Image (cartoon, coloured by chain):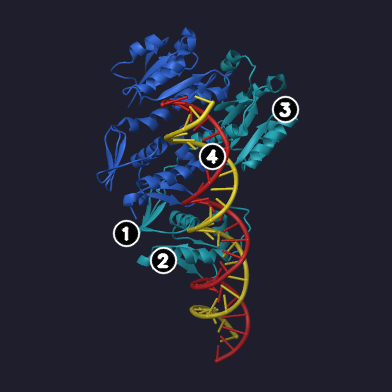
Chain colours: A blue, B cyan, C red, D yellow
Amino acid sequence: MSRRVLLVEDEAPIRDMLKFVLEQSGFETIEAEDFDIAQQKLVEPYPDLILLDWMLPGGSGVQLAKSLKQHEFTRDIPVIMLTARGEEEDKIRGLDAGADDYVTKPFSPKELIARIKAVMRRVTPTSNEQPIEFNGLKLEPISHRVMANEDALDMGPTEYKLLHFFMTHPERVYSREQLLDNVWGTNVYVEDRTVDVHIRRLRKAIGMHGHDAMIQTVRGAGYRFSTKL
Amino acid sequence: MSRRVLLVEDEAPIRDMLKFVLEQSGFETIEAEDFDIAQQKLVEPYPDLILLDWMLPGGSGVQLAKSLKQHEFTRDIPVIMLTARGEEEDKIRGLDAGADDYVTKPFSPKELIARIKAVMRRVTPTSNEQPIEFNGLKLEPISHRVMANEDALDMGPTEYKLLHFFMTHPERVYSREQLLDNVWGTNVYVEDRTVDVHIRRLRKAIGMHGHDAMIQTVRGAGYRFSTKL
DNA sequence: AGGGTGTGTGACAATTTTATTAAACGATTA
DNA sequence: TAATCGTTTAATAAAATTGTCACACACCCT
């Protein structure tokens, strides 16, 4: 199980508190107090998750988040942002640099741990870079590509993530809400019905060879990826 | 489905607004303006979630939160705190009484609803239901699907629920009224005979392999799911 | 056999849910 | 700043499901 967390926080007392909480729950923690130190510690073996204070001095928390997403090897490490309450939430949301979740201070240790575990559960299968194939529809995480019997398919980022989630969780119904949680991430406030639109685009994208039959509507329950029928 | 929210807030206008927002989203709301009234309303049936203003007069919001966690029957009810932006964060952090989430005023209705749903989802984890099988007729709750010897069967949501109920309560007669209570839900005004129609639809759906013989009519009493005869 | 009662069936209109399309929006880049 | 790409929302169309009815049918009793 993935257990290593990089903790980036400038205030020593809070850092210590977090370290304590994390270790109580069996996580190994690597500490960093600023952008530079964090960069230094970001080498093999990479942490399984990064807990990042949004408001590092000089706004370098934002910088770090962006930098993480730009480098191939760190792109897939899940990030949980620690945000202070007073901050204008819309701004933060707007500046979203690809965090997987946000935790607003103050938070309970219980909540923090729960969210860390939730994110890890969600992302871990993603970090498995093995191609996945069903009935000639192949998704290759490494090249970030979807092939249908030798033809490369074209789709948007959200459709890719959605398909990835489906293919790693086949033969299961997911409600629109669950899909939003798992594909869009928690703390994202989007209409349920938006899922429909992305489902449609995904079906369209993989439909040329009839693969869209695997994306199934389950009336009153949600959607399912299945090879049957 | 979880739908009842206890709303504890002293300021009437805000309370009204919240009530409106909640009911718009299909939640049933119980209102309380202070500690005592909240305690009074905290009886069976317990609410599924409590929305609690942190800053009730006299700090009784804190009291209530603590009291909730001390009583066995209320301990597991998730609590979302409403906190005002200006408040001293550290104090709150220290006083943390185990809230499941915080929402900072002012907030958007959408955000509030999203958080309520998220908390409910988190607290009610997927009840891992095992597949049930009788004579080659298999119902899989996870994929929300019914299979008859490798063939996927097609049926409407009500027929699915009906079959689910039957398969989890085999070898027992149920009157039409009992079926309505258990499958449709209590306090639903529907004709008894409507059950007949759904029984027929269910039989038709599972009939291709002769599985409809398990849905048996008990004249004068109701219907029964049985593997015998 | 006939009447009375309870159940099966097909059709139908209302309602609910999902699919589809178009437009608004937001962020990024030229 | 305009142009572009992708996402979200809103509006509309399409489809599936629902409860009820009217009537056919089956069973039981006298």
Could you tell me the amino acid type at mark 4? Glu
Determine whether, in the image, residue A216 is placed left or right of residue B178. left
- Quarter-wise, where is residue B229 in the image? bottom left
- Judging by the rendered image, the residue that carries numbered circle 4 is A191
Q: Secondary structure at mark 1?
A: loop
- Judging by the rendered image, the residue that carries numbered circle 2 is B212
How far apart marks 1 and 2 lie (CA) works out to 14 Å
Q: Secondary structure at mark 3?
A: loop
Q: Quadrant of the N terminus of chain B?
A: top right
Q: Earlier in the sequence, mark 1 or mark 2?
A: 1
Mark closer to the observer (2, 4): 4
Mark closer to the observer (4, 3): 4
| x, y percent for residue C12 | 58, 69
Residues beneath discs 1 and 2 located on the same chain: yes
Which one is nearer the viewer's eye here, A59 or D6?
Answer: D6
- Judging by the rendered image, the residue that carries numbered circle 1 is B149
Q: Residue at x 58, y 32 (%)?
A: B111
| x, y percent for residue A17 | 47, 13
Determine whether, in the image, residue A185 is placed left or right of residue A41. right
Determine whether, in the image, residue A185 is placed left or right of residue A163. right
The chain to which mark 2 is attached is B
- Judging by the rendered image, the residue that carries numbered circle 3 is B10
The chain to which mark 1 is attached is B
